Every structure is written in structure tokens, then in C-alpha cells.
Amino acid sequence: MGKIPEEWGDIKVLNAKIGDYTLIARRNGSDWYIGTITDWEKRSFEISFDFLADGLYEMKYIEDGINADTRAIDYKLKSNKITKNDKMTIHLVPGGGWIARINKVK
């Protein structure tokens, strides 16, 4: 997925509860990065991409694999195309996480 930037032009907290979970979107230039982590409770979140500008984007993301709650090395790398009108539900295992990089296609 490449290097994660150190400086951000915009940060949006999409969902969070101190001590339990965090879901944050950060922008560097025209690229967006989304990250989430949970405590020892499994969780599901719906992400709305309404913070994106108009256009088509490619999203590459890493999600927990089926055995990620016992083997942290179990993950899946996926990609798809999205727009600001899309929503996506993600699922995290206990102690799990999810990360995405979003690049504008056109």
C-alpha cells in the first residue's frame, strides 16, 4: 500500500469512543487514508465516503482475515472503485483493525 505520510491537510473523526475504538480519515494532497482499530470487542462500522470530492476513486484496503483474532498475520488485501456517494460496512475482529488508501482516478 506504500508509505504513510507524516503530514495531513485534513483529519476527520468518522466514529470513535475513547478507550474502545477509533475510525479516522486523513488527507494528504488528494489522497485519503482511513484507519480504524478496536479494543477486544468485535465491531462493525458503516463508512460513508461523503467527505470525498466528486469523481471516481480507487480504494486499496487491508481487512481482518477469518482467523485474525488469534493470528494477527491473517489479513486480506482488497481494492475497489468508489465515489463520494458510496457506503461500505467493515467488520473488525476483537483487537482488529482496518486500513485504506484512496486515490482519485478521474
Image: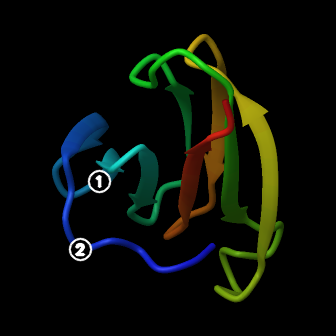
Residue drawn where x is 47% and y is 80% of the image: 3
Mark number, residue 6: 2
Residue drawn where x is 79% and y is 51% of the image: 79
SS label for mark 2? loop
Residue in front for this viewpoint, 49 or 106: 106
SS label for mark 1? loop
Q: In the visual, does 85 lie left or right of 71?
A: left
Residue drawn where x is 42% and y is 59% of the image: 38
> Between marks 2 and 1, how big is the CA–CA gap?
25 Å
Residue 41 place in picture, x, y as percent: 48, 56
Q: Quadrant of the N terminus?
A: bottom right
Residue beneath label 1, please?
A: 20
Counting residues from the start of the chain, the first of labels 2 and 1 encountered is: 2
Q: Quarter-wise, where is residue 73 in the image?
A: bottom right
Residue drawn where x is 69% and y is 56% of the image: 60
Three-letter amino acid code of the residue under disc 1: Asp
Q: Quarter-wise, where is residue 43 in the image?
A: top right
Mark number, residue 42: none
Q: 52 above or below 29?
A: above
Pointer 2 with pointer 1, Cβ within 8 A:
no
Q: In the visual, does 53 lie left or right of 11?
A: right
